[in-house]
Image (cartoon, rainbow, N blue to C red):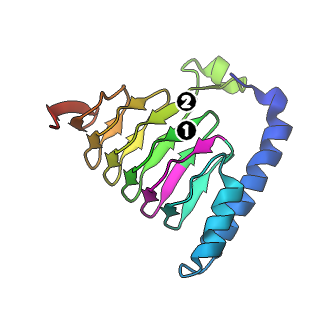
Amino acid sequence: MYSSENEKKQFYERMQCKALCHKYNSVSPEMLGIRQDLIKRLLGKTRSIFLIEQPFMCDYGYNIEIGENFYSNHNLLILDAEKVVFGDNVLIGPNCSFFTSVHPLAPEKRCSGIIEAKPLLVGSNVWICGNVTVLPGVKIGNNSVIGAGSVVSKDIPENVLAVGIPCKVIKSID
C-alpha cells in the first residue's frame, strides 16, 4: 500500500518515467538501437532480444521486467505501481493495458489517497491478443493465449485459451 504522503517522491519518479517514455515514442521507428537503449534505461529488467512498438507508456518503469524474445505491438500501457513481470517468448497485441493499482470502493478512503497495488505475472510462451486489459494481482500461466478484447480479472492457468469479459478458460491447449 502507498499513500499521498509519498506523493512528491512518486510524482518525481513518474515525471522522470514520462520524460523517458516521451523520448522513446519520439524516436524514429528505424532507429532501433536508440529505442532499445531508452527502454533498457526505463525498465527494471530486460533481456537481449525484445521489441516494444511505439507508442508505449508506463508509470515508473523500474517495476517492469520483460523476458527474452518479448514483443509488444502498438499502444502498450503498463501502470506499474507494483511489479509487472513477463516471461520469455511473450507476444502482446495492440492496445493492451496492464494495471496494478487498486483504489478503495468507499469514497472516503478513495479521497484519502490510500491506494493498494498488486503485482502481475505473465508466464512464458504467452500470447495476449489485441485490446486486452489485465487487472491487478493476476497471474497468467505459461503457454496460454488470451483472446482479443478480454478483461482478465482472475488467474489464468497454464496451457489454455481464455477469452471474454470477464476472461474465462474455454479450452486446453495441447
Is 96 colored magenta in this rendering? no
- Numbered tag placed on residue 59 in the rendering: none
Q: Position of residue 146 (x, y in %)?
A: 29, 42
Q: Residues within 10 Å of mark 1 (few under 14, many from 20)?
A: many
Q: Secondary structure at mark 1?
A: strand
Question: Which residue appears at 55% of the width and 60% of the height?
Answer: 56
Question: Which residue appears at 36% of the width and 25% of the height?
Answer: 154
Of residues 17 and 91, the one nearer the viewer is 91
Q: Residues within 10 Å of mark 2 (few under 14, many from 20)?
A: some
Q: In 3D space, how far apart are the residues under numbered discs 2 and 1 (Cα atoms)?
A: 6 Å
Question: Which residue appears at 54% of the width and 20% of the height?
Answer: 105
Check contact, mark 2 vs mark 1: CB within 8 A.
yes
Q: Disc 2 marks which amino acid?
A: Pro
Residue 27 relative to residue 86: left or right: right
Picture quadrant of residue 113: top right
Q: Is residue 93 above or below residue 7?
A: below
Q: Position of residue 143 (x, y in %)?
A: 29, 40
- Numbered tag placed on residue 119 in the rendering: 2
Q: Quadrant of the C terminus?
A: top left
Q: Which residues are magenta?
A: 63-77
Q: Disc 1 marks which amino acid?
A: Val
Of residues 66 and 81, the one nearer the viewer is 66
Q: Secondary structure at mark 2?
A: loop
Label count reads: 2
Question: Which residue appears at 17% of the width and 37% of the height?
Answer: 173
Residue that numbered label 1 is attached to: 84
Is 67 colored magenta in this rendering? yes
Q: Position of residue 115 (x, y in %)?
A: 65, 26
